[in-house]
Image: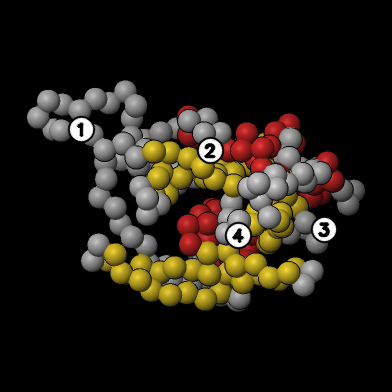
Amino acid sequence: MDGEEPAKEIEALIQRLRLHQPPPSYAGDPSTAATPNAGELLKPRRAAVLICLFRGSAGELRVILTKRSSSLSTHSATALREAKEEIGMDPCLVTVVTSLEHFLSKHLLVVVPIVGILSDIEGFKPVPNIHEVDDIFDVPLEMFLKDENRRSEERERMGQVFTIQYFDYEKENRKYVIWGLTARILIHAASIVYQRPPDFVERRLQFNLPKYSISSSGSAAS
């Protein structure tokens, strides 16, 4: 019975997240053409990022990260394919459940977070690509909603003040810092999963770009 309860909780989470509808995207509609008098429509490049969650030994949800800049796996057309190439993640082990709000990087790259559930952590045998990944580690997802081990700094851009979040994490005498865009994405993901806002205030840049509605299924394989 002990193993059945966590499995039921994971299945309930999968079903709930599949109902999640992300807001309109910055990515633009590929079928949209610029009108003769409107000039060229701005269409930022897109990349997928895999938020791979699994149940830890204490029952907590954890997220797998890679260390280049202590970041999620990014800059790919397909998040699962990149995870396979970077850390040896077998796509068959991951259940993709939804996409989240799209994020726009400072380089005008639209980042599409894809949430996947790794139901069998024992079946995952990490094989890091030494040319791209220094380390593979995991952290509790809920830490991105807490004020503990968090620091921040305010910056100004385009006349707007925004906050950069830094989360410090230590495991097996190794220290990691998760910050910037990765931290922003994981704060949002944790808010969706745990259905509550973070314990701290966020100030984010507001971009005035055209937005278009894109379905979750379409976002995952762009």
**Mark 2: which amino acid?**
Ser
Residue at 24 percent across and 25 percent down: it is 33
Q: CA distance from mark 4 to mark 3?
A: 23 Å
Colouring chosen for the image of the structure? secondary structure
Q: Is residue 188 left or right of residue 84?
A: left
Q: CA distance from mark 1 to mark 3?
A: 52 Å
Reading the chain from its start, which is encountered first: label 4 or label 2? Answer: 4
Reading the chain from its start, which is encountered first: label 1 or label 3? Answer: 1
Q: Which residue is mark 4?
A: 70
Reading the chain from its start, which is encountered first: label 2 or label 3? Answer: 3
Reading the chain from its start, which is encountered first: label 1 or label 2? Answer: 1
Mark number for residue 76? 2
Q: CA distance from mark 1 to mark 2?
A: 25 Å
Q: Which x, y percent locates residue 220?
A: 53, 34
Residue at 52 percent across and 30 percent down: it is 221
Q: Which residue is mark 3?
A: 57
Reading the chain from its start, which is encountered first: label 4 or label 3? Answer: 3
* Front residue of 7 and 214: 214
Residue at 41 percent across and 33 percent down: it is 214
- Using the rendered image of the protein, determine whether residue 67 is visible from the camera's viewpoint: yes
Examine the image and state in which quarter residue 63 appears: bottom right
**Mark 3: which amino acid?**
Ser
Q: Which x, y percent locates residue 199?
A: 52, 72
**164 lies above or below 5:** below
Q: Secondary structure at mark 2?
A: strand
Q: CA distance from mark 2 to mark 3?
A: 31 Å
**Mark 4: which amino acid?**
Ser
Q: Nearer the viewer, mark 4 or mark 3?
A: 4
User: Label 3 crowding class (10 Å Cα cut-off): few <14, some 14-19, many 20+?
Assistant: few
Q: Which residue is mark 1?
A: 40
